Amino acid sequence: MEKPSYKNCREFSDENIDNLRACFDTTLWHNLLSDTENIHEQTSVISDYINFYTDLCIQVKKKKFYQNDKPWLTADIYDLSSVPINELQSIEK
């Protein structure tokens, strides 16, 4: 059995998203772009600004992942897998 891997994942709660939205709503975007006409520099400035406030407002949690994890298999899907096929066919009709 292999060891689990750990990854940092952002926790996008409603409160965190509201805080991030408030930061962006109060931003004077034209001031960020007024220093340069170069589109590459403007893109870099905007990206750095968004990343800064995302790091500030959205919490990061370390999560453990196993090699055999199946994130697409939710509890609802797992419950359906235990239902006999005859019952599923009658539900579809």
Image (cartoon, grey):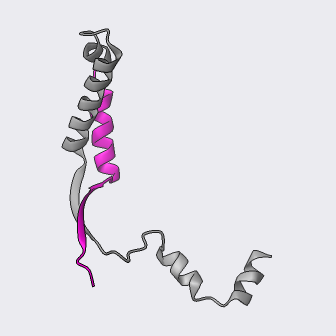
The residue lying furthest to the right in this view is 93
User: Which residue is depicted at the point 27% across and 85% down?
Assistant: 1
Vertical placement of 74 versus 80: above or below? above
Q: Quadrant of residue 29?
A: top left
Query: Which quadrant: the C terminus?
Result: bottom right
The magenta stretch is 1-27
Q: Nearer the viewer, residue 46 or 30?
A: 46
Question: Is 55 inside the magenta-drawn segment?
Answer: no
Q: Quadrant of residue 13 in the image?
A: bottom left
Residue at coordinates 22% horizontally, 60% vertically from top-left? Answer: 61
Query: Is residue 50 in sight in this rendering?
Result: yes
x, y percent for residue 60:
22, 55
Instruction: Please name whichever residue, 55 or 67, is drawn nearer the observer in this view of the structure.
Output: 67
- In the image: residue 34, left or right of residue 91: left
Question: Where's residue 44, x and y in %?
Answer: 28, 25
What residue lies at 31% left-to-right and 30% top-to-bottom?
A: 24
Residue 26 visible to the viewer: no
The correct choice, above or below, for 13 with respect to 78 in the image is: above
- Image coords of residue 49 (percent x, y): 24, 30
Farthest front residue in view: 2
Total residue callouts: 0
Q: Is 24 or 68 nearer to us in this picture? A: 68
On the image, which quarter does residue 48 sit in? Answer: top left
Residue 40 at x, y = what percent?
32, 20
**Residue at x-position 66% and y-position 91%:** 84
